[in-house]
Amino acid sequence: MMSFLRIWIQGLYNPTGAFKRLQPRPAPYWGLWAILLRFVVTALTSILALRILERTPFYPSSLTFLAADQYYTAEIFFLPLFGLACWLLAGALVHLILRGMGKESDFDWILNVIGFGLLIPMPVTWLVDWVSIALDIYGLGITPLIHSLISIWEIALIAVGLARMEEARPWVYILLAALVKIGVFIPLAAIFIR
């Protein structure tokens, strides 16, 4: 457990070192724990707070069977499943693209990288969310801008982690990391997450 926390904290100030320390760790288990931690903590803090405060989503649900006043109640339960599904889908896409390019690819390592790449910035994300919820500006004003900057940080982290495979040029890993965030997580979040 302490090694997990050390890698997470090291990722905040030395991502290259963190991914180097992550490499010998069990894959994809550490990535699984990272993605679960990210989405379960978010569900049990930010989303639960929105539900307790009886807030409604800042834009209408794409899931028409869920009423706006019940959306956050449901999201508490499906957010971790959403995270797991996106984690697996994004990992599979990166793996298939690398294999399609004729490169070696370690699917388990990719899942570890995506998990930690999305977990490392979460203390900042949680703080922004909690403050914006407390100020009743969640989803408004500067919050989406800060989330966009955090997404860029996540892309950079995932690219650094993927580059440890040393199978392709760095720009390939940057594009693959962007695919993870911009091609999988953000579009699906726009449909399911409020």
Image (tube, rainbow, N blue to C red):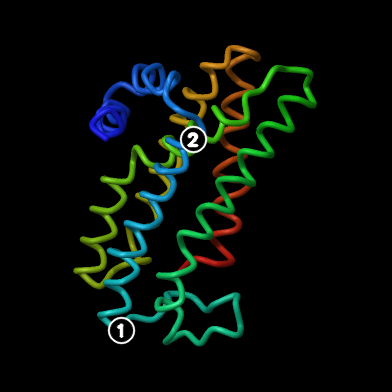
Residue that appears at 32% across and 56% down? 41
Tell me residue 2's x, y (percent).
23, 31
**SS at badge 1:** loop
Tell me residue 88's x, y (percent).
60, 45
Type of amino acid under label 1: Glu
- Residue 155's disc number: 2
Compared to 11, does 130 lie above or below? below
Type of amino acid under label 2: Ile
Q: How many neighbours does mark 2 have within 10 angstroms: few (below 14), some (14-19), or many (20 or more)?
A: many
Nearer the observer, 120 or 150: 120
Compared to 125, does 158 lie above or below? above
Residue that appears at 53% across and 52% down? 84
Tell me residue 67's x, y (percent).
51, 87
Comes first in the chain, label 1 or label 2:
1
The picture quadrant where one finds residue 8 is top left
Nearer the observer, 96 or 145: 96
Q: Is residue 126 left or right of residue 83?
A: left
> How many numbered discs?
2
Residue that appears at 41% across and 76% down? 72
The picture quadrant where one finds residue 100 is top right
Q: Is residue 130 left or right of residue 15?
A: left
Q: Is residue 113 left or right of residue 179?
A: left
The picture quadrant where one finds residue 1 is top left
Residue occupied by mark 1: 54
Q: How many angstroms separate mark 1 from mark 2 (CA)? A: 33 Å
**SS at badge 2:** helix
